[in-house]
Image (cartoon, rainbow, N blue to C red):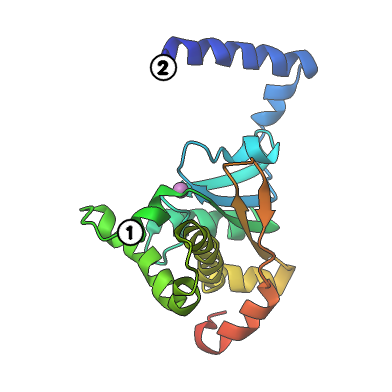
Amino acid sequence: MNLNKVFENNEIWIKEKLAKDTNYFEELGQGQNPELLFVGCSDSRVTAEELMGLGPGEAFVHRNIANMVISIDLNAMSVVNYAVEHLKVKHVVVCGHYACGGVKAAMQSADLGILNPWLRNIRDVYRMHRDELNAIEDQENRYDRLVELNVQEQCVNLIKTAVVQKAARQRGLVVHGWVFDVHTGKLIDLKIDFEKYLKDIMEIYHLD
Ligand code: CO
C-alpha cells in the first residue's frame, strides 16, 4: 500500500465534501451528536460507517477483536459510558461478522499467548451454549452460530452495565445485535429481544 495515496485520497475527499456543502467542515468542527454507538470487530472488512452508509458525526465507534464487551476492559467501558451517559446515543449496536478470525481462534485448541485471556471470553460463550453448538454437525454452520451467540452475549454484557440499565429505564435506550455477512455484504439484524433480556437478568444484575 502506498501511503502517499492515502493523503491524495484525503484531498479528493475534502474537495468532494466542499463541493456539496461549503460549510461542511465548519459544521463538523462544531461538535458531534451521534445517535448510534457501534461496537464491531477490528477486522479490516467490517468498515463500520461505510457498510451502514453513514458519514462523519453519525456513529460513535468502538472496535476490538471479535466485538467483545468485557466488564473489566477500561477501553470498552469508557466508550460505552461516554456514548450512553454523555452523548446520549439512542441505540447501541453490537455487530459481529461471519468468518471472524477471533471467533474461529476460540474454537481451536492453540496457545495464542496474550490473546488467550481475550479469546477465553468467547470460549465462555461456547460453554454457555455448548448443547446447541455441539448439536450442529457442520463445522461452518457451528462457527456461524457461535458468531451470532457471541453477539447475543455481548449485548447481554451491555445490559449488565449500570449506564445501559439506567438509560434504558429513563430514556428508552435500546441494544441491538447485528451480524455483517462478509460473503454478501448484508447486514443482518439478529432481532435480539432486548426487553426479554432486560427482564430475565435483572434479578441478578440489577444495578440502577
Ligand atoms: Co472478527
Task: Give the answer, above or below, for where 128 lies relative to 152.
Answer: below
What mark, if any, has residue 1 been given in the picture?
2
Rendered view: 127 above or below 123: below
Q: Residues within 10 Å of mark 1 (few under 14, many from 20)?
A: some
Image coordinates for residue 201, horizontal then vertical, percent: 56, 83
Provide residue 106's location: percent of width, then percent of height. 35, 59
- Disc 1 target residue: 118
Q: Going by the picture, which residue comes out furthest to the bottom?
A: 203
* Image quadrant occupied by the C terminus: bottom right
* In the image: residue 88, left or right of residue 207: right
Residue flagged by tag 1: what amino acid is it?
A: Trp
Q: Is residue 160 visible from the viewing direction of this image?
A: yes
Q: What residue do we see at 67% from left, 53% from top? A: 188
Residue for point 59% across, 50% down: 38
Place residue 13 in its image quadrant.
Answer: top right
Element on which disc 1 rests: helix
Residue reaching furthest to the front = 137
**Would you say 43 lies left or right of 156 here?**
left
